[in-house]
Amino acid sequence: MYKMQTFSSKVKGSVRISGSKNATLPIIVAALLNKGRTYLKNIPKITDVDNLLAVIKKIGCRVKFKSHHVLIESDLKYQDLLFEELKKFRASYYFMGLFLALFKEVKIYAPGGCQIGNRPINYHLEGFKLAGVDVVEDNQIVHLKANKLQPFTYSLPKKSLGATVNLLLLASKIDGISTIENASTEPEVDDLINFMNFLNIKVTRFQNMIIIEGKKQINLNVSYSVMPDRIEAMTYLMLGVFSERIKIKQINLLHLEKPLMLLKQAGLNCKFGRRQIIVYRSRLKPIQLISGDYPEISTDQMPLFYPIYSRMEGVSYFTEMIFDNRFHVVKELQKTNADIIVIDKTVCITGKNNLIGNDLVATDLRAAASLLLEAIINGDSTVTNLFYLERGYDDIYNKLRKLGVVFKVIKRV
Ligand code: EPU
């Protein structure tokens, strides 16, 4: 049992957004391409990062993680990666691209991660094959091996963040020019591309196409600061709609352009600053949102809107286009008496008053964030399975306390 109980609270104050989880994970893995010292700044203290760094230490790298800074010194030797820890998080599959680049071989468990629908890795494997990799999958173990890696051109059947990252890692040391077409356009991928350029690997994006010129030896001392987490920013922004005032600092407004534009049109009461936004209590008009590849609304942001719109007048629609089963949270929100249902791929919400508190059970990271918002706004609920939240939200309990949220965390074995 690991849960949070919320009480009625008056939310007001400011919050500083941490580094992005989905940019940090690939950048940490890419740091292992470098034989020199890599100093990464703005790293969130979350369990996905802790798990990744634990694995990196276990395979022989030196790692120091303090005050959101990580120092990595890598001197990897080939070894099979059949560690249970790697089953715990999705980004473990970045070791495929990394180990192929470094050793032309990897043996690893198929990746874990949040249960938000079918999450195959067929695009990753198709891309690897084009570079000359033999793929053997046997009972949850993936064995990849190449005699020689060759430059490749792969057009992703559908934009995939994970496959784009894996193919960037793979191409990083291949002699010659590799091309990823229909590549992911998410800002987290561009952050990785920037970092790779810091490592002197020449990576260029032309809209949906990414061109990589591999570099055999990388031995540099580099320092890099990871981009802010746009999903964390959106979480506090949604809380802001039910607060007196929240100042959300250290954000990149450009990464939030589409949702902010639509929310502004719907009546969001806010003020923009250079790297910050101040959100005031707002009454929002009904909205229709469709998730999509960046710059569209991110699939990760969608569940954050549900508790807010459960209380706004009118009928709103949220269509999920990326994952095929990201709707477990809807059943939990129904426990509050909210008028929320799923029709095909669309969550339909009719706003109402008098929602009731209840015991809400998180089933994945963004569901946990959605239920957390619900519980705070309601002021008389519990949220169970907080470990999902800790996978992706840095310093969440302190940040909430500073904003005046009243809650207690209950740990009972
Ligand atoms: N897909 C395939 N085959 C593949 C790869 C992807 O069919 O080989 C499909 C997926 O099933 C999905 C779509 O392509 O329908 C996009 O998936 P993508 O590969 O982009 O997702 P991912 O890399 O597994 C990352 C984030 C997710 C985020 C998605 C979408 C990490 C560790 N995870 O997942 O983050 O939702 O991109 O932007 O970066 C989260 O932070 O809560 C989270 C789930």
Image (cartoon, rainbow, N blue to C red):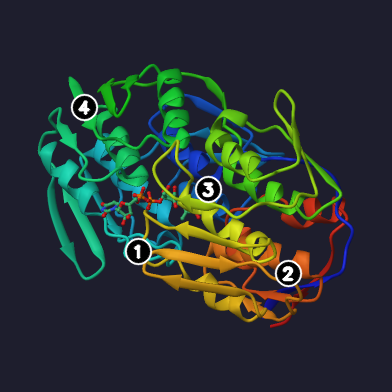
Q: Is residue 229 visible?
A: no
Residue type beneath disc 3: Leu
Q: Mark 4 sits on what residue?
A: 179
Q: Mark 1 sits on what residue?
A: 324
**Which labelled disc corresponds to residue 53?**
3
Residue type beneath disc 2: Ala
Please name the residue shown 62% across and 52% down the image: 46
Local SS, label 4: strand
95, above or below 209, in the image: below
Local SS, label 2: helix
Q: Residue 403 location, x and y as percent?
A: 85, 51
Please name the residue shown 18% across and 42% down the image: 128
* Residue 108 in the figure: left or right of residue 349: left
Query: For the residue with label 1, is its CB less than 8 Å from the closest atom of ligand 1?
Result: yes
Q: Which of marks 4 and 1 is in front?
A: 1
Q: Given contact means CB atoms under 8 Å apart, are the residues at marks 4 and 1 in contact?
A: no
Q: Earlier in the sequence, mark 3 or mark 1?
A: 3
Q: Residues within 10 Å of mark 2 (few under 14, many from 20)?
A: many
Please name the residue shown 82% across and 52% down the image: 243
Local SS, label 1: loop
Q: Mark 2 sits on what residue?
A: 375
Q: How crowded is mark 1: few (under 14 residues within 10 Å), some or many (20 or more)?
A: few
Q: In which quarter of the image is the C terminus?
A: bottom right
* Residue 199 in the figure: left or right of residue 281: left
